[in-house]
Image: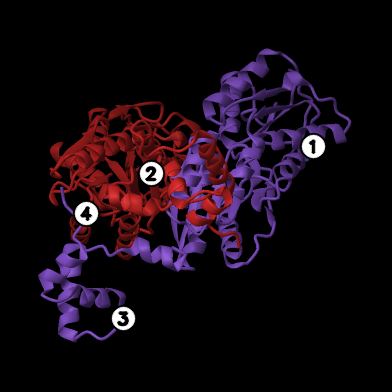
Chain colours: A red, B purple
């Protein structure tokens, strides 16, 4: 097994004192230029690792930002990480990322891990923010910014999307187009984001005086296959509906495929809208309507907020909810005479 | 700013000696049960961080695996990370991930960062493995496994896909179906993986005695828009072709969309195949033909290989090339009478 070389071995190789090697490494005190070069060459060749950990401890900062994510599937989180790096790169910070499996136990472990690695702050993404998360965060000696969830009630700084607002807004667009029997393909029932979107959908119906029918609401796991299955379940109920709102593009594409396989014409008979705007929408058989919000900006704003918190004396509560745009495209049209 | 509490403050709060706190934390030596509980409560409440770094140094291992990736876009890398975690979770290792921007300078920085964080081994993904990478790796005191590239020439352990073989095999399937004028939408010219796929395409033509026409070969950046543009470029050349092989699904979907917009029927006039099998293929207007290989298994195998290296005395060269399957679906058919 290869071994780390220590400072005395470097000194021995160079034929100088340990103090001299130390001066070269820390760039402190006078050293003859030829000696400096010789030592640097040995450091380079041997890959000598000085006691940086001790230095880090003394300096009380590592210029490292930690990030815990519960899920890397889907393009959103990757884009958010790109956004985080956009900020860190230009501020001489590096990112240490870990993936939890979404359980409290795993998340606790990853907070501890990042703390041991002496990160200066943490960006935290979880499926559903709980009281226990608040406790974990309060015990940390560094600031934390939550990404993708509204943690205002817990007083924890966050950057999130306006799930309820855009789900409501998009559903209202369909109602304005004459749709009254609208199905909803939701996400996992324990996902805060999915539930916020469902709430927005329901609020839009209620505000328009339309009864919310449980038969028109299903829950899936965000994937195309799941959208397909849930759409099939609703079709089997044989109730008339003229529009579908899906919690994300995966579910919306599944719905499109299912409707096509059952000879239901989109948008002539049923309009389809996904509360999302991913690369899947571009690949779909017809231009999918949806809501655009930027994951890259999400990560960017989270990192900005975290750096600010890291530089301040007190960790004030702060929040940022990102803007969105609703796009109606080919997959949506005004309600027609259709009876199924 | 919140502050770390030190051992003497914990001792003071508990009204005991520093040695007692240390015994509780390290679970060594006798401590009265009530005292132990009191101290544990204070440790819990204050979030006291003992000098774990010193302990880690003494123990010479951290149970951490590092991972450097150059790119998180696309679903492949996320799945590979899931595969890595599948191994690490069941072996009590944690993953520290960093994203380089793909430049040598950035990669060097991230190797150094992971070394400073005392990881026990590193999984490394890069766009194009170079001599400089070999130097960086040889200087590290821990083993490295390269993911997604064949580094046999450099003698660095790797886990990769059989790019050339499956690109050749898939192209041969098209040739067997009678296609002789086949276009190729390639990836970035500096990507080793993309070039291996292009090589496989060319080898298949050459083996069949078909001249390779430069007019039928384009390069893009893997995205749908790029596939669209490159397909358009080839269409403009007004040469007859009856099939297209795209380096990935993004480019293949772009080609499909472009052909549709130009009233070229797929598969009746032109067959389309992507050297990939992602979620995009499921979302496309017709079932896209492609090659299946598992990114999850890629990560799994890389982590397995790394753990093995970490446990052995010598870092032997080792390699693993993952299996693949070619799937012909709706988007491909036998060549017909078509003349464009």
Asked which quadrant contains residue B252, the reply is top right
- Pointer 2 local density, CA inside 10 Å: few below 14, some 14–19, many at least 20: many
- Pointer 3 local density, CA inside 10 Å: few below 14, some 14–19, many at least 20: few
Residue B57 horizontal/vertical position (percent) = 42, 63
Q: Which label sits on residue A99?
A: none
Q: Does residue A216 show up?
A: no
Closer to the observer: label 4 or label 2?
4
Separation of disc 3 and disc 1 at Cα? 73 Å
Q: Name the residue under label 2.
A: A95
Q: Which label sits on residue B28?
A: 3
CB atoms at circles 4 and 2 under 8 Å apart?
no
Which residue, as the protein is rendered here, is positioned at the far right? B209
Residue A324 horizontal/vertical position (percent) = 27, 30
- Pointer 1 local density, CA inside 10 Å: few below 14, some 14–19, many at least 20: some
Q: Name the residue under label 4.
A: A141
Separation of disc 4 and disc 3 at Cα? 26 Å
Label 1 resides on the chain identified as: B
Closer to the observer: label 4 or label 3?
3
């Amino acid at each position: 097994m290869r071994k780390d070389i220590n400072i005395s071995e470097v000194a021995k190789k160079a034929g100088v004192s340990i103090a001299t090697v130390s001066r070269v490494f820390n760039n402190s005190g006078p050293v003859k230029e030829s000696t400096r070069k010789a030592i640097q060459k040995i450091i380079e060749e041997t890959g000598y690792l000085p006691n940086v950990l001790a230095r880090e401890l003394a300096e009380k900062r590592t210029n490292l930002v930690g990030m815990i994510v519960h899920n890397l599937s889907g393009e959103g989180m990757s884009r958010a990480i790109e956004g985080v790096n956009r900020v860190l790169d230009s501020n001489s910070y590096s990112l240490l990322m870990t993936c939890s499996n979404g359980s409290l136990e795993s998340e606790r472990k990853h907070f501890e891990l990042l703390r041991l690695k002496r990160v200066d702050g943490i960006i935290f993404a979880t499926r559903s923010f709980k009281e226990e998360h608040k406790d974990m965060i309060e015990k940390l000696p560094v600031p934390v910014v939550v990404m993708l969830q509204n943690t205002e009630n817990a007083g924890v700084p966050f950057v999130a999307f306006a799930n309820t607002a855009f789900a409501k807004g998009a559903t209202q667009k369909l109602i304005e187009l004459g749709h009254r029997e609208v199905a909803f393909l939701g996400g996992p029932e324990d996902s805060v984001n999915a539930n916020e979107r469902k709430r927005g959908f329901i609020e839009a119906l209620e505000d328009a005086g339309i009864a919310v029918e449980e038969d028109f609401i299903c829950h899936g796991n965000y994937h195309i296959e799941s959208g397909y299955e849930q759409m099939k379940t609703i079709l089997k109920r044989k109730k008339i509906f003229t529009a579908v709102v899906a919690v994300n593009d995966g579910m919306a594409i599944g719905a499109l495929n299912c409707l096509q396989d059952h000879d239901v014409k989109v948008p002539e008979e049923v309009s389809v809208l996904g509360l999302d705007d991913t690369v899947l929408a571009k690949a779909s058989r017809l231009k999918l309507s949806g809501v655009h919000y930027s994951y890259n900006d999400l990560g960017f704003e989270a990192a900005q907020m975290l750096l600010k918190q890291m530089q301040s004396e007190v960790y004030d509560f702060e929040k940022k909810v990102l803007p969105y745009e609703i796009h109606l495209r080919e997959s949506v049209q005004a309600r027609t005479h259709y009876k199924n």
